[in-house]
Image (tube, rainbow, N blue to C red):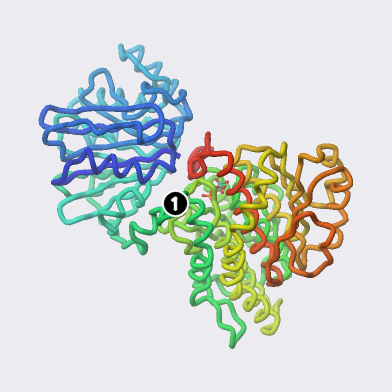
Amino acid sequence: MCGIVGYVGDDTAGQIVHGGLENLDYRGYDSAGMALLGDDGLTITKREGEVSNLSVPTVTGATCGIGHTRWSTHGPPTDTNAHPHTGMSDDIAVVHNGIIENYEELRATLVADGHEFTSETDTEVVPHLLERELDDGRDLRAALESAVAKLEGSYAIATVCADTDRIVATRHESPLVVGHDDDAAFLASDVTAFVEHTRDVTYLEDGDIVTLADGDATVYRDGEVVDRPIDTVEWDATAAEKGGYDHYMLKEIHEQPTALRQALSGRIDLDRGTADLDLTFPAGFLDSLDEIQFVACGTSFYAAEYAAQLIESFADVRATAELASEYTVDGGGDPRRTLTVAVTQSGETADTLGALRRANGGGIRTLAVTNTLGSTVTRDADDSLFIRAGPEIGVAATKTFASQVTTLALLSVFVAQERNALSAADARDVLTDLRGLPGAVQQVLDDAGDVREAATAFVDASAYFFVGRAHGYPVALEGALKLKEIAYDHAEGFAAGELKHGPLALVTEDTPILAVLTEGTRPEETLNNVAEAQTRGAPAIGIVDGSVETNSLDTAFSVPSLGPVTPLVANVYFQLFAYAIAKQQGRSIDKPRNLAKSVTVE
Ligand code: F6R
């Protein structure tokens, strides 16, 4: 949630900062603003709504600037609550991601000292604190260091001051990355902001203070300069463009075959029947495990539920998926015989990081499964495994779900083999199914026109119910979530057998049932549940693979059979269906209302 951009260099800062905000507006799009430091001091401009509402002011000599795109937490999205925020004067500007938990207390102290506040945000305490520190004679870096020592909560903060030609920034539990170019330095909450200018980046650590001045960045820790490595981002700016599609989401749905090839590349040895992951656990650790716990949120949680089922069936070990926000280590088994796996596309989701820290604190070994190099989760977990999906800009996760399940399926085989629970022949079958995924997904994508046409009949439905069993159940949940997110329609996913235990009361002729009816998901039983809904008038759409007779369905879409990962292919139909419904309703598909790509608050 929220995006920060900063630039110091020889070019016109206004255009570069605005461009960065446009690249980041998937992180939050309630309001946007920027502060540019030019020959006549600071010029601050901010506006409610998307970045496109914000025009770049003409500021002579502006070669330094910060910007922000907001997903509101404290205070509604208005011009006044938009960032940057200032103190008593307009000589200092601050942008902030995260939440300052003790802001009420700080604000009360500052008000008692005569400070006047204009916004309802938690952020506004920061420029006021900085003013106080600067008045005490500190320079901007020392002032920021001293001010953040008073903050509780999570933050990435960047600030510029009228009489210092530099940006000073810091982070605590909220991402911040620096970009290095020949004569320029960039700052952002996500490399997407500046990847068109440079792919050389430094991921800051909690507590680092960075100054961007004279086209260069210097990182400090406790007042001393520290060396931080420079990494090269593997993808370039074209990967974060729409590439001719109407929406990023549609582009990313169509990128799935490529994303899956990347997830599998170099990780399958069919001759030996092994999943080769670059993971090393202490000798005997996997073999001695009593339990693997997955923690995640939203779509990543559904990928985790899928993975827990795969691990249990392949690796002969108890596996659970828990919503990260509900996870506690209390009452668990022996921490030395437990592995907690945090599944998070962004690597920055506060709920998931919170769960991971609780696991770490309980002495449990942890593994991060993520799409994002350098993200907080990769630092907090003992080991990391990357899903290699490339940048995902659409707020609704699509290709990353496919890449998560695929990578976790590889992990399941890996763990199973370490535990001698899966023969090479059985592993080879699963790995062959995984190898078939990119082609099978492409077949579904080639059918996109038919899905679009079929969806026309259901665009006015009053609700949509998705059902499935076994691996079909998390996919039903994910199908419903996609429809909710981008079409704003009521959609629910149910374990098919549960329909008759209550939800059937909701079923009418205006509530289509979408069912996963593929091999391994007990399709005969699910078909019975679908028939119970059809008897009450509901139209039925099934994703089938020929494993059962499905003539009774009103609409059927076929997928090739790929054993335990067939429902992952079925999911692509659900993605296309949700997209088609939302498109026909004219929704804001890439930036659905009230949502943001990365939720860095608990
Ligand atoms: C749904 C969606 C969210 C995320 C969730 C977790 O389309 O995008 O439900 O899956 O916020 O995000 P990550 O995976 O970044 O931890």
Rendered position, 324 above or below 445: above
Q: Classify mark 1 as within 8 Å of ligand 1 or not, answering yes or no.
A: no
Please, what is the three-letter code of the amino acid marked with disc 1? Thr
Q: Which of the 4 quarters of the picture holds residue 81?
A: top left
Q: Position of residue 578 (x, y in %)?
A: 62, 48
Q: Position of residue 540 (x, y in %)?
A: 78, 51
Give the left or right position of residue 550, taking residue 259 as reference.
right
Residue at far bottom of view = 271
- Residue at left 41%, top 23%? 78
Q: Mark 1: few, some, or many residues within 10 Å (few <14, many ≥20)?
A: many
Location of residue 73 in the rendering, given as x and y in whole percent from the top left corner: 48, 29
Q: Residue at x 70, y 61 (%)?
A: 557
| Quadrant hosting residue 147 | top left
> Could you tell me which residue is drawn at 85 percent across and 43 percent down?
537
Residue 373 position in % (x across, y down): 42, 59
Horizontally, is 100 left or right of 144 in the view? Answer: right
Which quadrant does the N terminus fall into? top left
Q: Is residue 499 visible?
A: yes
Residue at mark 1: 376
Q: Is residue 210 left or right of residue 518?
A: left
